Image: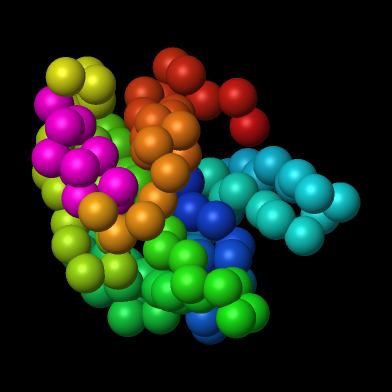
């Protein structure tokens, strides 16, 4: 079925050396390059180890502001949403996201940031 694609925000990691060690296949810069969204690619056999590493180094603040993050991986109809303390295995259809969205809201992530987009290779733009 192929590799997983994922989206991860540079600010979500306390140890940014991870971006030198993963396969980045695209990026999108915003706010004058201060924020970068990376589209990454990972082999299925490497995914669990990468998720553990991402979770272990996931930030919970920006400077003095408390801020939670997530990243997500997708392949076919599978969507994996990774928060610092939880992982959700859902489908790429929004109807299956309710528990992950509720958790994201619970930890303080605004609802408009919990769209998990893109979550299909066909929807990728960068």
Would you say residue 99 is visible in this rendering? yes
x, y percent for residue 91: 16, 28
Place residue 100 in its image quadrant.
top left
- Residue at position x 67%, y 53% from top? 36
- Residue at position x 75%, y 46% from top? 29
Q: Name the residue nearer the viewer: 69 or 54.
A: 69
Q: Residue furthest right?
A: 32
User: Which quadrant of the figure contains the C terminus?
Assistant: top right
x, y percent for residue 10: 60, 63
x, y percent for residue 7: 47, 46
SS assignment for the magenta stretch, majority: helix
Q: In the image, is 49 to the left or to the right of 32? A: left
User: Which quadrant of the figure contains the N terminus?
Assistant: top left
Q: In the image, is 19 to the left or to the right of 27? A: left
The colour scheme used to paint the residues is: rainbow
Place residue 62 in its image quadrant.
bottom right
Q: Name the residue nearer the viewer: 62 or 1.
A: 62
**Count of numbered circles on the image:** 0
Q: Compared with residue 43, is residue 58 higher up or lower down, i.e. above or below? A: below
- Residue at position x 63%, y 79% from top? 63
Q: Compared with residue 9, is residue 26 higher up or lower down, i.e. above or below? A: above
> Is residue 51 within the magenta segment?
no
Would you say residue 2 is visible in this rendering? no
- Numbered range of the magenta stretch: 96-105
Place residue 11 in its image quadrant.
bottom right
- Residue at position x 29%, y 50% from top? 104
Q: In the image, is 111 to the left or to the right of 98? A: right
């Amino acid at each position: 079925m192929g590799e997983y694609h994922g989206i991860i925000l540079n600010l979500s990691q306390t140890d940014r050396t991870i971006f030198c060690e993963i396969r980045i296949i695209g990026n999108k810069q915003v706010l004058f390059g201060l924020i970068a969204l990376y589209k990454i690619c990972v082999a299925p056999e490497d995914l669990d180890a990468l998720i553990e590493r991402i979770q272990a180094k996931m930030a919970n603040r920006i400077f003095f502001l408390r801020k939670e993050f997530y990243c997500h991986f997708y392949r076919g109809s599978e969507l994996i949403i990774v928060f610092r303390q939880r992982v959700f295995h859902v489908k790429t259809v929004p109807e299956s996201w309710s528990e992950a969205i509720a958790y994201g809201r619970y930890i303080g992530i605004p609802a408009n940031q919990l769209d998990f987009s893109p979550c299909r290779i066909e929807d990728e733009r960068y």
